[in-house]
Structure formats: structure tokens, C-alpha cells
Amino acid sequence: MLDHYMICEGGFKNITEGGEKTGFQFGARLPYYRGLGLSMVEDLAVTVDGEPVPRDQILFSVRGKDWTLAQLETEMEERWEMGEVATVKVKRPGGLPPGKHNVELAERLRISYLPFTPVTKDAKELTLSE
């Protein structure tokens, strides 16, 4: 029900470090009516312009802290709250060229009372202005 709110329209930009474009980022929300501990975020899958991003090239950031997806598995202190915008960062030398890009996000979340692990997906066309 909240899946079409997962990818945020704002916050889509290239990441620049030391004058070099090292990747890109976009905002993301939980498709769930409650917050979750970060260890319950089992996976984030990103596809850009039809190209899947390798799992080890994705970072998750909330409240200014970054985690690899492997580090999320053991993060027991921090939470991702309902409605809170997290940042999904993708390592990609050179970033993305300006213009429109199709961004897809799939979130696999462990919900304590469900006997299965749901995967919720969203896709949006986002415009990179730089």
C-alpha cells in the first residue's frame, strides 16, 4: 500500500568526493506502517536504467550514518522510522549523466509477525539536473 512512496522525488543527485563524481544517491522510505530496526532490512536492490546494481556497491544512510548492506544485518541499535527519508547511495565512478533515469528499488523487510519475508518494489523516472 505504501510502495509508491518508497522512492522520493527529491534528493536524486550525483555524489562528489574530492572533485570527482563517485556515485549517485536518492531518498527512500519504508513501505511499512511502523519503524524497523536496521537489522530487519534484509536487502535493498537497486536497478538504474535497466542495469542492476551489485549489492556491494550500495550504501544505506539514515540520520547521517552510512552502512553497507552487510553491516545492516548486525545493526541492532539504530532504526528506520515510518515516514523517515533514508538515503540510498550507489558507488559508480563518474556518477550518472544529467537527464532522466529510470530508478527501481526493491526492499526486503523482515516483519516479525509475518510467516514470509515480503519484497516491496517501486520504480520512478527521476531527473538528474547536474
Image (tube, grey):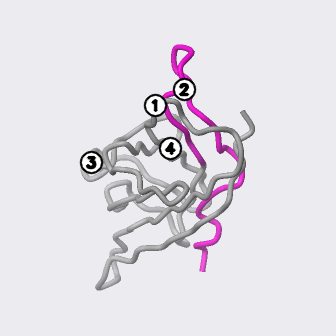
Give the residue drawn at x 58%, y 39%: 96
Mark 2 closeness class: few <14, some 14–19, many ≥20 residues within 10 Å: some
Which quadrant is the N terminus positioned in? bottom right
Q: What's the residue type where badge 2 is placed?
A: Lys
- Of residue 8 and residue 125, the one placed in the foreground of this image is 125
Mark 1 closeness class: few <14, some 14–19, many ≥20 residues within 10 Å: few
Q: What's the residue type where badge 3 is placed?
A: Ala
Mark 4 closeness class: few <14, some 14–19, many ≥20 residues within 10 Å: some
> Element type at marker 1?
loop
Q: Earlier in the sequence, mark 1 or mark 3?
A: 3
Answer whether labels 4 and 2 touch (C-beta < 8 Å).
no
Answer whether labels 2 and 1 touch (C-beta < 8 Å).
yes
Distance from Cα at disc 4 to Cα at disc 3: 15 Å
Q: Earlier in the sequence, mark 4 or mark 1?
A: 4
Distance from Cα at disc 4 to Cα at disc 2: 21 Å
Number of numbered markers: 4
Answer whether labels 4 and 1 touch (C-beta < 8 Å).
no
Residue 69 percent coordinates (x, y): 33, 49
Q: What's the residue type where badge 4 is placed?
A: Val
Residue 67 percent coordinates (x, y): 37, 41
In the image, farthest residue toward the bottom: 115
Distance from Cα at disc 4 to Cα at disc 1: 23 Å
Distance from Cα at disc 3 to Cα at disc 2: 24 Å
The residue indicated by pointer 1 is: 93
Which quadrant is the C terminus positioned in? top right
Give the residue drawn at x 30%, y 82%: 116
Magenta extent: 1-26
Label number found at residue 62: 4
Label number found at residue 21: 2
